[in-house]
Structures are given as structure tokens and as C-alpha cells.
Amino acid sequence: MSELIATDTKRTARWLSIALRRLGQLVGVVLGIAVVNFFLLRLAPGDAVQVIAGESGGASAQYVAALRQQFGLDQPLWVQFAKYLGHLARFDLGYSFREGMPVAQLIWNRVPATLLLMGSAVLIAAIVGLLLGALAAWYAGRFVDVVISTLSLLCFATPLFWTGLMLVVVFSVWLDWLPVGGMQTISSGLTGWAHVLDVAHHLILPAVTLALFYVATYARLIRATVIEVRREDYVRTAIARGVRPLRLFRVHVLRNALIPFVTMLGMQIGSVIGGAVVVETVFSWPGLGRLAFDALVRRDLSVLLGVLLCSSILVVLVNWATDAINRWLDPRIS
């Protein structure tokens, strides 16, 4: 009994140590990202006051000075940075004078749309890429492998914005099957399942556009990894023992080939967010990518800093989840 208690105590202490270490890493990463983003954006030419003055067709020196004082841009850079860190310490992302609301609320309103788009795109890319890669590896060197490899290379080399525009031309303009953009039909008043289907109808084109590039990446990765794993000694041993081909491929080959696939999937979450900026702009999708693009054009640095910070935290959390999944796939990973 005492040995079980001691084992449980050691396990609890180990998990607590891991949690504290992870929390410290998160704080360090967030602080580093906040510092880099703040100074990079402040060193860029132009600010929100100049954009507002340009939109109004010109402004007096007094009006410009009043705006700089209101936005806090008349203070030294180190004072602005100290205030920014003070706001972060209170979990306050600042205030958007262009939108007239707190940055945290503005981001929170856009998060569901971005998570829906990213989740759908990653799910499509993972499933389709896994199936195509496994199929290409199963028929390596044959016609099916050549077709899949050629299409993967084509999707990989095609820019996201061009893919999105071509899909709009084909499925929205020519065939009139799918809507051009937006997240839902304006002034439709739909509720319940009708609203869900309407959002799903609008989601198809942007999700497929964002997923196509990553389908190509994952298919090529799975193909190469499966072919490599099939040459391992333990696979040859399983073949010698008479393991059925389907079970051999599913249990011994594909499971071990998933480790680099999951790692790549976690590493590319950051690039998915970057691709969402392009896709959300092309399809007028009301997510964080579109918000970041509008904030950049308007020089609304508070919003842009908030979006970059939240995106960075999301990437860190996804990387932690990736490590956990890899440990589950291969317990030897410590």
C-alpha cells in the first residue's frame, strides 16, 4: 500500500513539474513574442494618426497632435512599451480607437470564424493527405502513384490566392453552386439547422482552398515515410510471420509513419494561420486573418499586436498537443 502511495506521489510530482515547466515556457515565449512584435511594428513607417489624417483629406497640426495624444503616440517609445507590458500583465490587450471597442472583445468576436475555417481546413488536409499518401505508397511506382504525386506537386506550387480565385470563378461564377464569399447569407434570418447548413455552404470554398496546399504536403510526406517504414526490419519480420497485408499496413507501417505526419501537422499550424489571412481576404471571411489585414492597412497597431499574440499562444498550445500525441503513438518518446 505504501509503495502504491509513493508511486502515485512521484507521478503527481512529475506531472506538476511538467506543468510548471510548460507554463514557464509559455510565459517566456509570449513575453519574447510581445517584445519582438511591439518594436517591429513601431519601427515600421506610418501610424494610425497619419492614416486617419489621410482619410479625412488633410488635417490641421492641432488635430494631428490631439490624435497622437489620445492614442498615446506622443510619448517616448520606452514609455509606450512599459504601458503595453502593464496592460498585458492585467490581461488587457488594449483598445481599438478605429473600431471603438476593446481589442480582446474584437478578437473574441472573430475567433469562432477563424477556428471553424482552420479546423475544417486542417481536418480536410489531414484526412485527404493521409489517404492519398498511403494510397500512393501502396501503389508506389505505378500509375496511381504518378497521378497523386503530379497533382500534389501542382497543388503545392500553386499560390493560395490564385487557387481561391479560380475556385470562385468555376464554382461561383460559372456553375453558381457555391457563394462567392462571406460566412452566411446576409439578412437571411436563418436559425437552427438551416443556419448551420448555410454557414457550411459558405465554408466549402475557403476551407478547400486553404486545405489544398497542405493536402499536397501531407500526401508527399506520408508517401515517403510509409515507403521508408516498409523497409524496416520489424516490418520484414512481420511479413515472415505471415501477418495479413492490410493488418501489416495498418498496425506496423501506418502507425509508425504517423509520427512525422503529426509533427508536421503541429508545426504547420502557424503557417495555416498565415494562409488564413490570404483566404479570409479573398473570400471576405470574418476571422482573425481578415481582422489582421484590415488592422495592418489602417495601422491599428493595438489590434494587430493582439492578433499576433493570440496566434502565437495558439501555436504554442498546438505544439504541446503534438508532443502529447507523439508520446501516445510511440511511448518510447520521452
Image: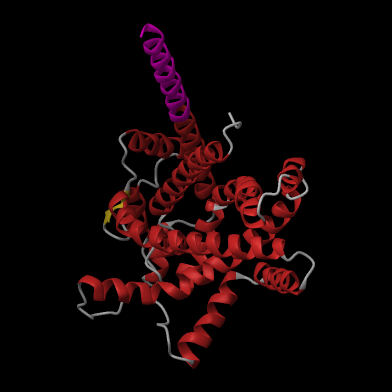
Assign the C terminus to one quadrant of the image.
top right
Relative to residue 179, is residue 38 drawn left or right? Answer: right
Identify the residue shown where x is 63% and y is 57%: 246
In which quadrant will I find the N terminus? Answer: top left
Residue 33 against residue 69 in the figure, above or below: above
Q: Is the residue 190 above or below the residue 96 in the image?
A: below
- Extreme residue in the top direction: 2
- Residue 41 image offset from top left, x and y in percent: 51, 49
Which range of residues does the magenta coloring cover?
1-23
Identity of the residue drawn at 43% across and 24% down: 15
Give the residue at x 53% y 58%: 272
Q: Is residue 210 left or right of residue 306?
A: right
Kindly report the secondary structure that dominates the magenta region of the rendered protein.
helix
The quadrant holding residue 176 is bottom left
147 with respect to 14 (left or right): right
Between 216 and 37, the one lying in front of the other is 216
The one nearer the camera, 164 or 208, is 208
Q: Which residue is at the front of the view, 241 or 226?
A: 241
Residue 4 covered by magenta stretch: yes
